[in-house]
Amino acid sequence: MKTKSCIGMWPHTFTAAVLFLLPASLLAEPVTLQHAVELALQHANGAAIAADDEQHASAAYRELHNSYVPQVTAGAGLGWSYGFPLSLEGSAPSLFNINAQSALIHPELRSFIRAAQTESSAASFRSKDQRNQIIQDTVLSYTELEKWEQRLGRLREATPEAQKMQAAVADRVKEGIDSELDGIRARLSGARLRLRITEAQGAADVLRERLSKLTGLPATGIQTEVESIPALPPVAFDEDAPTKAADSSPAVQSALAHARAQYLRAEGEHKSLLPTVDFAAQYALLSTYNNYDQFYKSFQRNNATVGVAIRFSFLNAAQRSRAQAADADARKAKSQAEAARNEVSEETLRLQRSVTQMQAARDVAELEYEIAQKSVEAVQTRMNSATANLHDLDNARTQASERFIAFQDVNFELERSQVSLLRATGDLESWALGTK
């Protein structure tokens, strides 16, 4: 009975062992680019930070705006009095009291409220810019991972042929056909291949970890799907594109809104020298043991006061200095906004020219790779006619592999420039998510 039980468990144990020994990439399910971007927008830390900043700015606006709503507090000022009933924290000792206060006429408060509202708009633009940054990081990490996965597959396919080549050269060295130097060169080719594989595997692991942090997916479960990457749109070389990109850039709009908010804050600091009027009201239930009846002609327990508090600022050097500092901050913010606008305009123009250059470089690298492939075919043909040897074939294959890697690198740099240009022109999200 025990033997039959063990035999029955053997297939399940074997299956579990095979699944455990399989590479993680074989167990992973492909993740489309669109799904990765959607997960990143929900999970990435940058999105949460931007949302918190936006909520903070909105709460700061509401805090100032609610200054016109009376603030009501209730409490008590219990205490024993000896002699004249002195105050407790500025109020007469009482069994129960209610205080209400709010702003009525505050010229500076209006400016501060408008500044907070404008700063809230700036936070919204920053949130949008952070959203674009997350999309760009996800897209570039995904496409770069796809590049390394494709390269790793090609290198692994070439490994058996490289091992056969190295073994064949080793046999020729033993037979005295090839020299020791030829054997070292063959081993060097194998070592270079292993180095390329290690490099590709390491880069792929790092990118999977980065995508894992962005999307929340386990790193071992991320595998790209090349068909899910939409074709990049052709670049329209509009002379007005840099200006349009600067006008529509969320980063520039955020800087402009922040500059406007700083100007309004400076305006508010100057208006803080103007007269202000506040509403105030108070009710207190006084006690009979605080000597009120001994020091006042008429005493009653229930007391109330309603009125306004008017303030005039005749001499306030500190506030004037604070207003001058706010003026400097406003001028600084304006200069920073102009610098941001110029930077976006220049970067858009640079990306346009970079795309043109990288397209030409990609065409060159592609043709060089095609020539290298043709050279491998030519050497194989010559080997069939005994006019070429193993070393010629090894050199041709090595050259073709290097040309393929160079083509991949140039093609990815072109994609990087195109994706950055899409972000600059405001078309990145619609391209990545397939929306219009």
Image (cartoon, rainbow, N blue to C red):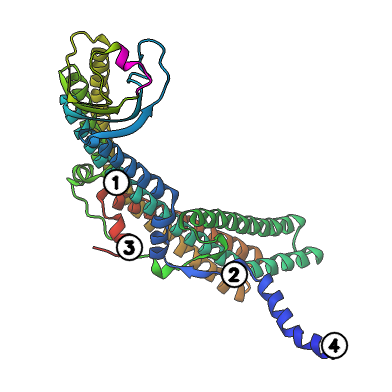
Whether residue 144 is visible, yes or no, is: yes
Give whichever of discs 4 and 1 has the lower sequence position. Answer: 4
Callout 4: helix, strand or loop? helix
Write down the quadrant of residue 37 in the picture: bottom left
Q: Amino acid at mark 4?
A: Lys
Q: CA distance from mark 4 to mark 3?
A: 58 Å
Name the residue that disc number 2 marks: 157
Q: Amino acid at mark 3?
A: Leu
Boundaries of the magenta span: 288-294
Relative to 374, say whether 51 is above or below.
Answer: above
Q: Amino acid at mark 2?
A: Glu
Q: Amino acid at mark 1?
A: Arg
- Relative placement, left or right, of 354 versus 331 is right
Name the residue that disc number 3 marks: 433
Name the residue that disc number 4 marks: 2
Callout 3: helix, strand or loop? helix
Give the foreground label among 4 and 3. 4
Return the x and y of residue 304 as percentages of the image width and height.
22, 27
**In this view of the protein, which residue sits in the foreground, 229 or 87?**
87
Give the foreground label among 4 and 2. 4
Look at 33% across and 44% down and name the residue there.
55
- Badge 4 crowding class, 10 Å Cα cut-off, few under 14, some 14 to 19, many 20 or more, is few
Give whichever of discs 1 and 3 has the lower sequence position. Answer: 1
Give the foreground label among 4 and 1. 4
Q: Are marks 4 and 3 in contact (CB under 8 Å)?
A: no
- Relative placement, left or right, of 41 versus 431 is right
